[in-house]
Image (tube, helix red, strand yellow):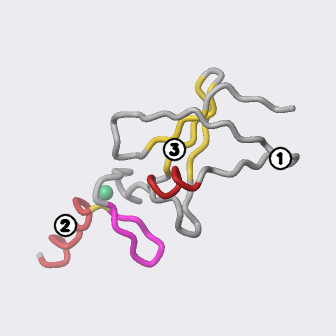
Amino acid sequence: MVSFSCLILCKEEDMEMKSESVVRNIDSVGRIVLPRDIRERLHLNMENSAVEIYTEEDKIILKKYVPGCMFCQNTDGVVEYKGAHICKKCLVMMLGRVNA
Ligand SMILES: [Zn+2]
């Protein structure tokens, strides 16, 4: 029997962390199902939505995965183009070089 003491999901852009008490069983290969309402609230209901998983002391943290800019790792205003993630600041800098 695997047990966990806390499950916290947080949205990258929310500085305020919201936690809920949700108990789910972990199957024999380590999978759990995230409750539908949480997936919908955090917009994790699209195919290939991803979460980061890490631990803090005895907690397992699931965090909505937001890819960072491939150049500066910034996660604000990132746009995806042909599989690459670039922030608006870097895009503006690149356009400045193209138009110079
Ligand atoms: Zn950038």
Q: Position of residue 26 (x, y in %)?
A: 78, 42
Most foreground residue, 27 or 81 = 27
Q: Identify the disc placed on residue 63.
A: 3
Which type of secondary structure does the marked residue at label 3 adopt?
strand
Magenta segment, prevailing SS (helix, strand or loop): strand
Q: Earlier in the sequence, mark 1 or mark 2?
A: 1
Q: Is mark 2 within 8 Å of ligand 1?
A: no
Range drawn in magenta? 78-86
Q: Is residue 25 left or right of residue 56?
A: right
Contact between marks 3 and 1 (CB within 8 A): the answer is no
Which type of secondary structure does the marked residue at label 1 adopt?
loop
Q: Position of residue 70 (x, y in %)?
A: 41, 59
Front disc: 1 or 2 = 1
Residue 82 is covered by the magenta coloring: yes
Q: Earlier in the sequence, mark 2 or mark 3?
A: 3
In the image, residue 10 sits, relative to residue 75, either above or below, namely above
Q: Which residue is mark 1?
A: 27
Q: Identify the disc placed on residue 92.
A: 2
In the image, residue 59 sits, relative to residue 70, either above or below, namely above
10 Å crowding of disc 3: few (<14), some (14-19), many (20+): some
Which type of secondary structure does the marked residue at label 2 adopt?
helix
Three-letter code, disc 1: Asp
Give the CA separation, mark 3 to mark 1: 21 Å
Most foreground residue, 98 or 88 = 88
> Which quadrant of the figure has residue 90?
bottom left
In the image, residue 89 sits, relative to residue 61, either above or below, namely below
Give the CA separation, mark 2 to mark 3: 29 Å
Three-letter code, disc 2: Val
In the image, residue 15 sits, relative to residue 88, either above or below, namely above
The C terminus appears in which quarter of the rendering?
bottom left
Residue 88 is covered by the magenta coloring: no
Q: Is residue 63 left or right of residue 22?
A: left
